[in-house]
Image (cartoon, rainbow, N blue to C red):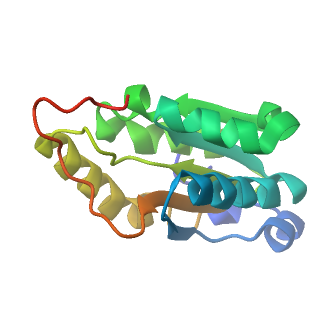
Amino acid sequence: MLEALSASALSPGAAAQYGAGLSHAALLYRDDGEYQARVAEFIRAGLDGGEQVFVAVPGHRKRLIAEELADGWGAVRYADMCDMGLNPGRIIPRVRGFIGDHPVRRVRYVCEPAWPGRSAAELREAVRHEALVNIAFAGLPVDIRMTRPASTRVRSPPPSAPIPC
């Protein structure tokens, strides 16, 4: 499976057109408006370039992105991270499957594996997941953006606080 998803699986023309390597960065935001604009900008750039896009964010974030993209949302594959990321060990195989579904195209992936409301154990697993991303996707034609609040750390809320998922 790894070989089929490696950069060498791209034809020389596709590798030149779509790029062969991993791009993995944080997408920082200060508030919902900036989140909405920055995520939508990243997605639009991919769609405009003929890339396939996969978004895995908590359900309450989906509305923000879908509103900003309007008709473009229909071209995006979405998974609720509150479900897909319940066990962070399931995230990488799911994204690799998406990449494998589009073997001659560069893909974009937006995710939010850590959010307020996750338990301390879940946050530790989300940190482990993020540490593995560069290894799991090395050489693959994928642009990954992990969303993060710019000025706060994600922490487990007090037991009485509502969980946004």
| Horizontal relation, residue 20 to residue 145: left or right | right
Q: Looking at the image, which is closer to me, 147 or 6?
A: 147
Q: Which residue is drawn at 78% across and 43% down?
A: 69
Where is residue 141 drawn, in percent x and y? Answer: 66, 62
Which quadrant would the C terminus be assigned to in this image?
top left
Image quadrant in which you'd find residue 45 = bottom right
**Horizontal side of residue 163 vs 140, given as left or right:** left
The residue at 71%/53% (across/down) is 40
Is residue 51 at least partly visible in the picture? yes
Residue 39 lies in quadrant: bottom right
Camera-nearest residue between 6 and 97: 97
Residue 17 image offset from top left, x and y in percent: 86, 69
- 40 or 80, which lies in front? 40
- Is residue 102 visible from the viewing direction of this image? no
Which residue sits at x=48%, y=57%? 147
Q: Where is residue 50 shown, x and y percent of the image? A: 87, 53
User: How many marks on residues?
Assistant: 0
Q: In this view, does 156 lie above or below 66?
A: below
